[in-house]
Image (cartoon, rainbow, N blue to C red):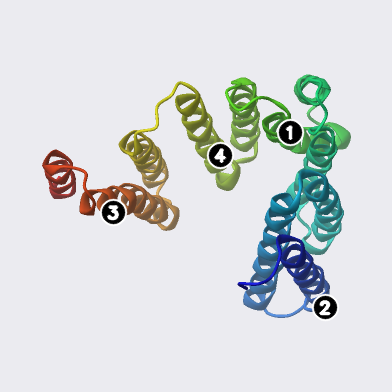
C-alpha cells in the first residue's frame, strides 16, 4: 500500500465495505459462521475507509461517515439488529459536527452539547411510558445519541477540553441503565469500557502521560469485568476479559521493560507477573 494516498485507500476500503454488505444480504439465509464473517468484513472495511478519509481531510471524513451511517442503517434491517440503527442515528450527527469543525466558532461544540441534552431528555421522558413501542425505540437509540455528542465534541472542542469525556460518562450511565433493564451483557460491557476511556481522557488532559498509569487502569478495568462475569457464571466472557486484562498489562509494560526504562520497572514487571 506504500504509494497509495489516504484518499485512494479510503475509496478502496469503502468500496469493499459496500460490496461486503451486498454479499451479506445475499447470504442472509446461509450458515451463521458465513454471515458473521461477512458482517465483520463490511464493518472493518467501512471503519478503515472512514479512518483514511479523516486522514485525507475532516470534510471528506464527514462525507464518508455520512455515507457509512446510511449503510449501517440499511445493515440494521439485514442483521435485524435495532442497536445498529441507533449507531447510524448517532453517527449522522457526528458527520454534521465534523463538517462544522473547521469553523473558527464554537458552534459545533454548542451543537454537540445541545444534542446531548436532547438525547438525555428523550431518554428520561421515555422511561415514563416503558410499555410504548416508541418509548422502547427511544430508550435504545438515545444512548447512541449521547455517544455521538461525545465524539462530535471531540472534533469541535479544544484538545484539553473535558466536555467530551464528561458526555462519554453520561452516555455510559445511560447505556448501563438500559443494559440492566434488558440484561444485555454487550451493552453493559461497553458502558464499563467507556468509563475507563473517559478517565483516560481526563488523565491525559491533566498532563499524565506515564504509560504504566494507563496499562494498569485498563488491566484493572478488565479484571473487574472478569470478576463480574465470573460471578454470573458466564465463563466464556469471563475468560475473554481475563485475557484482555493480562494482554493490556503485559504487552505494553513488557515492551517498555525491554527498553531503557530502568531496573525498577523490570523488577515491578516480574513481581506483578509472579503475583
Crowdedness near tag 1: few (<14), some (14–19) or many (≥20) residues, C-alpha within 10 Å: many
Which numbered circle lies on residue 26? 2
Among numbered discs 1 and 3, the one appearing first in the sequence:
1
Q: Secondary structure at mark 2?
A: helix
Specify the quadrant of the image occupied by residue 67.
bottom right
**Which of label 3 and label 2 is nearer to you?**
3
Query: 17 left or right of 192?
Result: right
**Cα separation between marks 1 and 4:** 22 Å
Q: Is residue 180 left or right of residue 101?
A: left
Count of residue discs: 4
Q: Label 2 neighbourhood size at 10 Å, few (<14), some (14-19), many (20+)?
A: few
Determine the secondary structure under disc 1: helix
- Measuring 81% from the left and 68% from the top, which residue is drawn there? 18
Is 22 left or right of 264, judged from the image as shown?
A: right
Which mark sits nearer the N-terminus, 3 or 2? 2
Residue 32 percent location from the top left of the image: 66, 74
Looking at marks 3 and 4 on the same chain, the residue that comes earlier in the sequence is marked by 4
CA–CA distance in space, label 1 to label 3: 34 Å
Q: Secondary structure at mark 4?
A: helix
Q: Nearer the viewer, mark 1 or mark 2?
A: 1
Q: Secondary structure at mark 3?
A: helix
Residue picked out by circle 1:
152
Of the image marks 4 and 2, the number of the one nearer the N terminus: 2
Residue denoted by label 3: 255
* Number of residues whose C-alpha sits closer than 10 Å to that of mark 4, classed few (under 14), some (14–19) or many (20 or more): many
In the picture provided, is 250 more to the left or to the right than 116? left
Q: Does the residue at mark 1 contact the one at mark 3 (Cβ under 8 Å)?
A: no
Disc 3 residue crowd, few under 14, some 14–19, many 20+, Cα 10 Å: few
**Mark-to-mark CA distance, 1 and 2:** 34 Å
**In front of the other: label 1 or label 4?**
1
Task: Quadrant for the N terminus, please.
Answer: bottom right
* Distance Cα–Cα, label 3 vs label 4: 31 Å
Amino acid at each position: 500500500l506504500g504509494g497509495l494516498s489516504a484518499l485512494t485507500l479510503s475509496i478502496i476500503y469503502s468500496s469493499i465495505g459496500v460490496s461486503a454488505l451486498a454479499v451479506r444480504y445475499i447470504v442472509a439465509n446461509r450458515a451463521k459462521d458465513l454471515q458473521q464473517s461477512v458482517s465483520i468484513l463490511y464493518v472493518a472495511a467501512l471503519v478503515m475507509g472512514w479512518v483514511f478519509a479523516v486522514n485525507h481531510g475532516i470534510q471528506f471524513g464527514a462525507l464518508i461517515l455520512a455515507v457509512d451511517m446510511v449503510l449501517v442503517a440499511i445493515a440494521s434491517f439485514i442483521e435485524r439488529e435495532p442497536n445498529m440503527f441507533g449507531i447510524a442515528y448517532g453517527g449522522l450527527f457526528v458527520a454534521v459536527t465534523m463538517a462544522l469543525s473547521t469553523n473558527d466558532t464554537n458552534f459545533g461544540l454548542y451543537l454537540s452539547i445541545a444534542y446531548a441534552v436532547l438525547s438525555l431528555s428523550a431518554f428520561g421522558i421515555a422511561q415514563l411510558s416503558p410499555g410504548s413501542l416508541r418509548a422502547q425505540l427511544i430508550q435504545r437509540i438515545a444512548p447512541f445519541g449521547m455517544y455521538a455528542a461525545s465524539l462530535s465534541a471531540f472534533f469541535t472542542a479544544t484538545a484539553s477540553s473535558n466536555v467530551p469525556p464528561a458526555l462519554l460518562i453520561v452516555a455510559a450511565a445511560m447505556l448501563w441503565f438500559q443494559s440492566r433493564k434488558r440484561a444485555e451483557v454487550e451493552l453493559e460491557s461497553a458502558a464499563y469500557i467507556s468509563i475507563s476511556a473517559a478517565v483516560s481522557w481526563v488523565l491525559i488532559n491533566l498532563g499524565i502521560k506515564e504509560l504504566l498509569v494507563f496499562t494498569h487502569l485498563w488491566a484493572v478495568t478488565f479484571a473487574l469485568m472478569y470478576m463480574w462475569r465470573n460471578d454470573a457464571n458466564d465463563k466464556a466472557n469471563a475468560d475473554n476479559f481475563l485475557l484482555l486484562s493480562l494482554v493490556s498489562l503485559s504487552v505494553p509494560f513488557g515492551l517498555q521493560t525491554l527498553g531503557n526504562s530502568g531496573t525498577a520497572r523490570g523488577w515491578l514487571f516480574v513481581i506483578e507477573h509472579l503475583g
